[in-house]
Amino acid sequence: MHPKGVAAAPEVVTLLAMEVTLLAAQSIDGFITRHFEPGTAFTSPEDQRHFKAALRTCDASIMGGETYRVSRDTIRAHVASPRRRVVLTRTPERFADDVVPERLEFTTEDPERLVVRLRELGHRRCALLGGAQIHRLFLERGLVDLIEVTLEPRVFGTGTPLVGGPVDLRLRLLGCAPLESSDTLLARYQVLRS
């Protein structure tokens, strides 16, 4: 109750920005799969340690249905960790038995609306985990802030590209260094807004 003549302060809702980081490992010729084998079994132990450490800094992650299917057992084994995992799929009903409230969800949501919803839920750092079509959707709509690419010293010639379709973005290199004492490089880029 406010004293007579004193108006209540309007409720102010401040939404902090949520940083979206595309995390990927690829061959030096730009493929995130070896030929068309699903998954990232080709990655080095150094990349696998980096990936796990990077995920620990995120409170949300987004991936496509195929990425989820390939990594389902691993994701389900770690679903108790506090990160919210969102799977974009055309058929969320197929995964009804896999839903874990506030930890693992499946949606057909528009990428812009999904990012807004995650931000409204209080998430501050979100990992975009692929695959190529999900990367394209988020990149072409200006929803990615950073790109962290592990460059494995491999050449495949064929496979799934990092981005599944045309985009045209400018990036600023933030850093590039070997992971530990290996031939695997980590390149970090900021996505420049037009």
Image: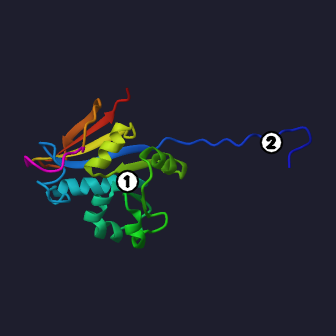
**Residue 157: in magenta span:** yes
The mark that comes first in sequence, 1 or 2, is 2
- Residue 12 higher or lower than 36, as above or below: above
Which amino acid is tagged 1?
Ile
Q: Nearer the viewer, residue 179 or 32?
A: 32
Residue at the image point whose x is 60% and y is 41% from the top: 14
Residue behind mark 1? 62
Q: CA distance from mark 1 to mark 2?
A: 40 Å
- Extreme-bottom residue of the structure: 97
Q: Secondary structure at mark 1?
A: strand
Q: Is residue 142 above or below residue 164?
A: above
Tell me the tag on residue 148. Answer: none
Q: Nearer the viewer, mark 1 or mark 2?
A: 1
Q: Main secondary structure of the magenta part?
A: loop
**Where's the C terminus, which quadrant?**
top left
Residue visible at 33% across and 35% down in the picture: 190
For label 2, the SS is loop
Residue 117, can we see it? yes
- The magenta-colored residue range is 154-164
Verify CB contact (< 8 Å) between mark 1 and mark 2.
no
Visual colour scheme: rainbow
Question: According to the image, label 2 marks what residue?
Answer: 8
Q: Residue furthest top?
A: 194
Q: Amino acid under label 2?
A: Ala
Q: In the visual, does 31 lie left or right of 133?
A: left
Please provide percent x and percent y for residue 128.
Answer: 34, 49
Circle 2 residues within 10 Å: few <14, some 14–19, many ≥20: few
Residue 39, x across and y down, in percent: 20, 59
